[in-house]
Every structure is written in C-alpha cells, then in structure tokens.
Amino acid sequence: MDNFKFHVYTEIFFGKGEIKNLPATLSKYGKNILFAYGGGSIKKNGIYDKVMSLLSEKFNVVEFANIEPNPSLDSVKRGVELCRTHAIDVILAVGGGSVIDCTKAVAAAFYYEGDPWDLVLDSRKITKALPIVTVLTMAGTGSEMNRGSVISNKDQKLKLGMGAPTTLPQATFIDPTYLYSLPPMQTAAGAADTFSHVLESYFKKGEDAFIQDKMSEAVMLTVIKYAPIALKDPENYAARANLAWASSLALNGLTGNGKSGAWSVHSIEHELSAYYDLTHGVGLAIIIPAWMKHILNEQSVDRFVSMGVNVFKISDQLDKMEIAKKAIEAMEQFFTSLGIPMKLSEVGVDEEKFELMAEKAVKYGALKHAYVPMTKEDVIQIYQLCK
Amino acid sequence: MDNFKFHVYTEIFFGKGEIKNLPATLSKYGKNILFAYGGGSIKKNGIYDKVMSLLSEKFNVVEFANIEPNPSLDSVKRGVELCRTHAIDVILAVGGGSVIDCTKAVAAAFYYEGDPWDLVLDSRKITKALPIVTVLTMAGTGSEMNRGSVISNKDQKLKLGMGAPTTLPQATFIDPTYLYSLPPMQTAAGAADTFSHVLESYFKKGEDAFIQDKMSEAVMLTVIKYAPIALKDPENYAARANLAWASSLALNGLTGNGKSGAWSVHSIEHELSAYYDLTHGVGLAIIIPAWMKHILNEQSVDRFVSMGVNVFKISDQLDKMEIAKKAIEAMEQFFTSLGIPMKLSEVGVDEEKFELMAEKAVKYGALKHAYVPMTKEDVIQIYQLCK
C-alpha cells in the first residue's frame, strides 16, 4: 500500500429533511450567499423554493443560474464577477457535479488575479477558496465530497481537472428525495459515473491496497443492486439513498488512496464530452467495456477475475480468461440494462476526431502511467471498438 | 436508511515515514505540547526517541506518561493538571486506544470546571476541547479517527463512553511499521476489536443500509485475511497497513451511520474489563460467539446468513439456520486461530459477578434497544456460555 493523505472534512447532512440545517450551516460563513444552480430543474421540483424560503429572510442571496452541463470557463468567469460585485461570503451550490464543479473553480478564482484557466492548468496556483456548501440534486460525480472539479474550455476544446485542499465543500446536504424527479437517463448516467470512479481505483497500480479494493467492490455491488430499482421505481428511498451515498464515497479517496498511477477511462471519455458535449456518465459507460476488452491480457487478468467473482458473482471454478470475459460481458449488459446507448454512433460521434481525441487523451491523462499503459494507437482502437 | 450526520475531519497521514510531517502539523496549534503515552513500549521500539528528536528543538514538550490500559479517571485528572500548569496548546497522543481515549477526556475536561467524570456521564456538557494529534502504535480501537473515548472509574467500577464533535483528533499519523513490535496478543486483540466494531454496526437495526453493510463486510474480510499474516510475520507491511486502515475505517461512522439502536457486545464486555481489567479485544472475542449463539433465531437469521455467505464464504445453497450456525463456528474458530483465550475461566473471570455485571451492562448499554433486545437474564446466559 502506498503512502497517502486523507483529509475529507466535508460535513455531511444525510437524509430526508436535513435541509433544515442549511441556514445554520451557511451562517457560519456570513450573510452574502451566491446561490448557484443549473438549467432550472430545481424550479420545477420545488428545491429552489425550499432553499429560498429558508434563506431569503436571513441572508442576501445572489443568484448564479444557468450553469451548463460540462461547465465552461465562461461560467466560471461569470461566477467570479458575481462574487466580487456582491462581496460574497459563501457559495451555495444546488445541483449535481456540473454546478458543484463550477463553484469550486469560482471559489478558487475569486482569490486569483489572472485568468481562472491558469488554475485549471496548474492547481498549485490555488492558494485560497471561498467556502462552498452543496445541496445535491443528482448523484454520480462525487463532487460533493471531494476537492476535484472538471472545467471545459470551449474555445480550446479542452476539458480538464483541477482541485486543491481548499476547494473541498465545507458541508453537503444529501436528501435522497431530491433525486426522485431525475430523468431516467440522468439516474443511469450517474450510476455509471459512480461505478466508473471505483473502477478507476480498482484498476490503479498497487498490489496490497486490499481494503481499498473491498471498498470499491462495496460501491460496485451497491450500484448494481440499486440502479435498476431507482430506474423502475424513481421514488424508492432506499435505492436513492444507497446510490447517493455510494456516489459520495466512491470518489473521496477511500477507494483510491494507497494506490498509484493514472486513471484510464476518464481521460478517454473527457475528450468525447469536450468535443461533443456528451453526458459524462453515458460516455463512460460506452468506453468502459471497450477499454476492458482492450487491456485484458495475461498480466492484467487477475484484476478482472477479482471483479468477476466478487462483484458479478461469476464462479471462481472457471478458467481465469473465461471469468474475465464474462465479467466484461456482465459489465456491458449492466450498462445496457440501464438504458444507456452503448455505441458512439448512437450519440452522434463519428470517426472524424478519433485521432485528435486520442492524442489529447494520452497527453492530458498521462495514460502511459495507467494500470495498463496506453498509447495514442491504443486509444484509437478503443474508440474504434465503440463505433 | 436512517438520517445521519458524518463529519470526520481528522487529517490522516498514512504510511512509512509520514511522521516527518508531525512538527508542521503540531505547529498549527502552538508551542506547548503535552506528549501523552502509555507504559513505555515506545521507549523500547524507538518511537519515543523519534518523536523527541522531531520536537525537542521547536516545542516545549511536557510528558504525560504511564497512561494505563482501560485509562482511569485518575489519569484524566492528572493530564488536566499538566495541561493547566503548562498552558498546553495541543495534546500529542502516541499510543493505542487507551492513550488516545485518555487524551480526549483530558482535552475536554481542560475546559470544564467540575469533575471530569461529569463529562463521561453526560457528554453534552463538553463545550470545547484542546486539539489532539495522534500517532498510532496499536491498531484496533479506531480512536484515532473518531470522537469516542472510554474511561474507567475504578472506584465505582464503571467503564463508560464519552465524546463530542470537538474530541475528534485533528490529525493522525499511521505508520504501519510502528506496529511491527506489537506483542502477538495485542495484534490479535486489536484485530478482534476492529472486527467487533463492524459487527456491532452490522447487527444494528435498519433494513436498507446496504452500502454500510458492504463496507462492514470489507473490513471483516480485511481482518480475516491479514490478522493471521501479521501474527505469523509481524513485519509484513501489507498486513500491518491493511489492519491499521481497517481499524480506523471500522469506527469512524462509515459502517454504522444510517442505522439505529444500541450496540450489543461492547456493553457486555465493558463490565468484564471494568471488574477484571481484561484486555478489551480479548473480552470481545470471548463474548462475540456466545452472543451470536444466544441471539440467533428465526427473526435474526438473515443477518447471520449474509455474514456467513459474504464474509465466511459459506455456500448459500445450505439451509439458512445451517449457514448461521456455520458462521458462528467460523467466527469462533477465527478468534481461536489468533491465539486468543476463548473462555472466561482462562482469563481469571469466575461466576461471582455475572449478575452484577449483567445488570450494569443492560442499564448502561441500553440493551433493550439492541438488534435483538436483551435483558439481564439474557446477559447472564451469555456470560454462562463463556465460562
């Protein structure tokens, strides 16, 4: 097990009605709130009204609306401007990963004189950040309990990660009933995203991070059990609760710390959403089985066997390669069963940019440091498998 | 899943050599350090010298030595006195659960005018606490990453828990090599303690805390895999690392939150160590199989089946009761295999106080709220099974 640091100080308020603690939580930081949200779904499902009713009397609330999926540098700049104009004390992010990610960049850029994109390119430049409190309305990214943020630079067609110890949310409210009204594709994409995070951890380097791998399996089993239930019965509290908590735990360090090397799938996917504005979780679900097929070999087979036996409950009496192939099949079938389109052609992506995207994925994802190192040619082959 | 709050802000420095970050960590809080430790094993294994060499030049170090296993109220008072006399800024606890638990009580009592025992009897009286930094030298209690503390009042023969949000350690250093020199019985007792913590969570009330149960299974599997390795090969880094991190994760809320009701085994054991100064983990290992036998019935059997199939890998094709009984056997065999004496008679406990201890266990443990509620008679029967 590699050395690691773990410092996840986010205060989690989990469960139905916990939003009642929001005013007391925000008031630790001040009166001036930037209320960040996305395209307006929170106005339809009542969350906007609930938040406003809790805050409007005691706080000065400035709205920062219309944060787009795959949040852009332009939105970040708009948020920073609002924070400076209104002397914001604390940012309240109500949404999923896109809204929360955007506010992390805003919180850090508030204290930075130059172009916020500098902080995306080099997170070491982040010295301070405004405090962030989040209210989760979509589970999957895990952004509510980690420091990471992914920002898209639409001009440069780049989608890159940033983060610092100070960009971790101070507090997060997770009310599973807030997820009831999610469209099925958002539920499915979120489940795929959660699964992908622990899969990336599972397929990092490092032999003896046993407890981390068992935690990853715990998350995978949770997603496999509850994603189908949430799709069939969107108001099933147990399903929403387990998926939401799984999402937070999947990417807060518990499953990945103590292991080393680069992630594999996210970099390959980020290019797709940078060029085609694809839903991240959908892109991941498409890439994962192809990537698994591509990297399966005599050296990597044992990882597949662990996953096959412990997660997909494939008999450990079979031949290793057979278990591995069955695990890949099971993975593909699971995503398909969630209703996710599993071919790039179904989501409007053709071959035109495969080479360009592969080049960038290898460069920005440091894929030569992945569990099974990948070159540009490997990534092109993976894209080809997804056509 | 029940509502819960989760706020574990302890900064973890995990791995060989991470102690190098100790001075920078302590200096956040001030110059005057109370250096707390136990019976002196840290002087034999070099940890004392290491700490002193890191601190002696930059800090004023006041030693608080000879904290006993099952730390006493008297030790707490002695620590408070030292803190007041030397205007201590931060407490450095170097040890296992006893040392860390003692410092939590000291840290809280420092700000309390009355008898520190008041805080044990009613933790709501804890308003503030001195910051605590820990260096772990024995894995098992999980005290390094939670707010709880167990203090023994030798006069009243009481061993009770206390804790508040402010008694959580600010930072914890876990260097698996610091566990190499543990005597085998300490390694075994620590493993049993870790196991017992997730077992208590596993057998709390609450139907749909699936991900928590899977996390508990992750910890159980880790203990089962690595405790025998650490006993056979005390300097096996992977074994020490996995056991240590399992210990911290077992009792920081991850496995127990979202469920309700009282713990079962700890209260029954606490009476043993209150009256006989028994090693906590040894007492737990003795009680657990007897308690399992006692509470197994048609209503509780499904929990046993989950544990049997997922942890002890018993075939799910067997009859439920058969799986449950095999799980109990496997549990008992596991503790026996660690070299733990599995009868009360082997550790100097006779029947004399069974009734008295049972009465106290039911009262202070609120055992009527346990997964399977227990009366005084139930507890006596459990003690009888352990004779």
Image (cartoon, coloured by chain):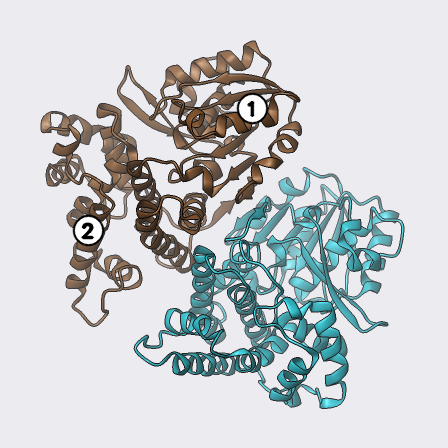
Chain colours: A brown, B cyan
Tell me the mark number nearer the camera, choosing from 1 and 2. 1
x, y percent for residue A86: 58, 12
Q: Amino acid at mark 2?
A: Gln
| Pointer 1 local density, CA inside 10 Å: few below 14, some 14–19, many at least 20 | few
How many dots with numbers?
A: 2
Please determine whether, in this image, residue B153 is positioned above or below residue A331: below
Task: Tell me the element at label 1.
Answer: helix
**Left or right of residue B101: residue B206:** left
Does residue A220 sit above or below A155 in this rendering?
below
Q: Is residue A129 visible?
A: no
- The kind of residue on which mark 1 rests is Met
Considering the numbered disc 2 on the image, is that residue within a helix, a strand or a loop?
Answer: helix
Please state if A252 lies on the left or on the right of A317 as rendered. right
* Residue B177, position as x, y percentages in the image: 52, 61
| Residue picked out by circle 2 | A333
Residue hosting label 1? A52
Report x, y in % for residue B127: 78, 44
Label 2 packing within 10 angstroms: few (<14), some (14-19), many (20+): few
